[in-house]
Image (spheres, rainbow, N blue to C red):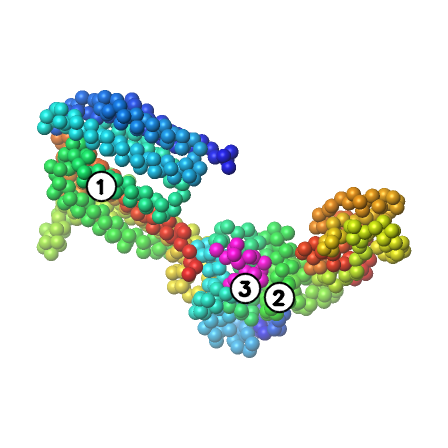
Amino acid sequence: MIRIENVSKRYEKSYAVRNLSLTVAKGELCCLIGPSGCGKSTTLKMINRMIAPSSGTITVDGVDVHEVPVATLRRRMGYVIQSIGLFPHMTVLANIQVVPRLLRWEESRSRKRALELLELLGLSPDTYGGKYPAELSGGQAQRVGVARALAADPQILLMDEPFGALDPISREHLQNQFLAIQQELHKTIVFVTHDIDEAVRLGTKVALLRDGRLVQYGSPEQLLAAPADAFVKKFVGLDRALKRLSRLLAADFLHPANSVARQAPPELLEAEFRRLEGSDCARYLWVTDEENRLVGWVDGNNTTEKRLNMLEDLVEIDPADISVRPGYSLKQALAMFVQQSVACLPVVDDERRLQGEIRLADVLKS
Amino acid sequence: MAGRRKISRVGGAGVTVALAGLVLGDFVLVRRNRLTPGVPLSVFEALAELQWALLLAGLAALLLFSIKPGRRQAAAGMLLIVLLVLALLGFLGSAAAELSEAGGSFTRVSIGSSMWLALFGLFIVLTDMVGRARLGLVGNVLLAVGFVAGLAFSALAGAYHFLSPVLEFISHRDRFFAELGNHLFITSLSIGLAAAIGLPLGLLIFKYRSPRASVFAVLNIVQTVPSLALFGLLIAPLAFISGEWPLLRSLGVRGIGWAPAVIALTLYGLLPIVRNTFAGFAAVDKAVMEVGRGMGMGPLQIFARVELPIAAPIILSGLRIACVQNIGNTAVAALIGAGGFGIFIFQGLGQSAIDLILLGTIPTIVLALCADGLFQMVMQLFTYRRFLT
């Protein structure tokens, strides 16, 4: 648990942080957010003493951070920054092993740990372990940055706009992955961002700062549903409803999929369509192959004859174009609904296997 | 694959230079004695048919290798160049032996322009192919060792015995090794001093902003003073110091000799070393330093594990420039009585004896190339160094 009490940071003329009090409970992911210059980064850096507060105290599990030797303190906290800062002269593995080596772990143990972490972050150890940072893309580099922060298994992670410099696609991908990892690891995380979407999507708590003061602190739902004042309202934006969708996962709105095997006899196809008549998603029947992988669909608006032809001369599609992954947020799903102008979308896993379908009506209701 | 290979312009140009030089230039100059002007002989006149045909065929093959220089072709080309150079020198030696025998015991056979052009052209091709063949450290060293071994073997077998620079070497043998010692002493002492001052100075002006501009200004001015002038300027103050402190005098510090040379060369070595040390540390990304601090590294750990290894290749390249430059400048120091290979050069200039000049010039160049190669090797070790155990 991190407790920040009445902390101020004063520079010669102005306050960067003014009388801030904030508690982050164990296992929470607290997003510090606000316009630039609001003191969010300063607050983060006071936790691992990169910056010394002018007044006030910060305690971790009841111990004042200034009572712990600074190197010990920092080695207990993972630290990730926007510009990543991988050591260019070390391989990916050596980068991840930096803190374990500082802590004088056995080499075999620290190496094993580094390999595990690469695996956890979806980078194949064989391919990436021996690479140098210059050989990585931005997204891969920040994955290594996160792995490095996790190396010594710290209970606390400090992340300063970690995904801020990535392109939108890698950022979203990394956010999803990071959420999945956090659900497994339950670290206590302080996460600085200026992106309200990111804060709402990732945070279990969001702290909105302005001019060094805490304006509102609560769950993302609270912030979206009941903004404390006009500033918060403006900051979270007019699309508050949309933002809430980004916190909901497609996996939680799964219906059994209406599907038919590619080799199915014509009678079965017709029977399926008759069965569906009148339901929400009567129009489409997903077509799968022997291994339940999505390969296409049949449009129920066609004549019977044409439907049969469609099954026979099925146009193979790239499932990514029309399907949703279970890990997608409803906001992402909504975008797909609009793009395809359909009321129903198939949900597939990483191997394209059909998991179910989600319905526009559910998204609109939630 | 074949479509991606391009014709190597550098390689092609190098072979052309070598070929044109060999065919059009003078292969040897035959003189009745050490000081008379020579009679030029072309490669066709000086060598047996089989010999020049072999050389031309080798160059033609090299041209083929540089038209589609893939990795294998480049490696084969490198081997061919080594063989060609050994053959060139060997044929030259045998031609010299024959011509000397025919002309009497005072006859001197010196190396003509076509030989220099051919060597120069082959060197260009070699630099091009080294980059393409990517043999790695071991491969390159093996090839170099093979070349030196071939050269040494031919030399010991007496293949070059009648070449005039070799004759000069034989008549100055003891002096040659003494001057080699002097040359190495002056160069290494000056580089050692320049590194001892320059490395900390570079780090200092990286950490502290205020002296930076003035340090660079002073070093730049030093660099613009001609070396001969700097040697001369040091004579008076050193003579004075030597007169005042007998202890220093007994160590050999005088107005002329090695002391002013070492001081001047140290000053020359400073600029590249300080500049590259500064640039090396400045090249370390601030984010990397911040993360190092944030992960709980102390200032010393950050310096030793992050800053220094990242800056090392650039710092080493500064040392390399200073070293190569000082090896050349040490030759000039012979004029103020410091010794070194410059002795032969200036003696040769005084006597208009080209071969004596070569006796000073060739080893100076070889020394510089060796130092350069050595530093490149160390730098390569740093760049490829794996921090995995």
Q: Which mark is residue B188?
A: none
- Determine the CA span between mark 2 and mark 3: 15 Å
Q: Position of residue A149 (x, y in %)?
A: 53, 64
Q: Residues within 10 Å of mark 1 (few under 14, many from 20)?
A: few
The residue lying toward the viewer, choosing from A266 and B254, is: A266
Do tag 3 and tag 1 residues touch (Cβ < 8 Å)? no
Q: Residues within 10 Å of mark 3 (few under 14, many from 20)?
A: some
Tell whether position B364 is magenta.
no
Instruction: Indicate the chain on which mark 2 is placed.
Output: A
Of callouts 2 and 3, the N-terminal one? 3
Instruction: Indicate the chain on which mark 3 is placed.
Output: A
Dot 3 falls on a residue whose secondary structure is: helix
The magenta segment is A114-130
Residue B389 vertical position relative to residue B149 in the rendered view, above or below:
below
**Residue type marked 2:** Gln
Dot 2 falls on a residue whose secondary structure is: helix
Q: Which residue is mark 1?
A: B152
Q: Residue visible at 58% across and 60% down?
A: A121
Q: Which residue is mark 2?
A: A182
Dot 1 falls on a residue whose secondary structure is: helix
Q: Which residue is mark 3?
A: A116
Instruction: Indicate the chain on which mark 1 is placed.
Output: B
Rendering quarter of residue A5: bottom right
Residue A224 vertical position relative to residue B28 in the rendered view, above or below:
below
Q: Position of residue B114 (x, y in %)?
A: 27, 26
Q: Residue visible at 40% across and 51% down?
A: B383
Q: Is residue B308 left or right of residue A328?
A: left
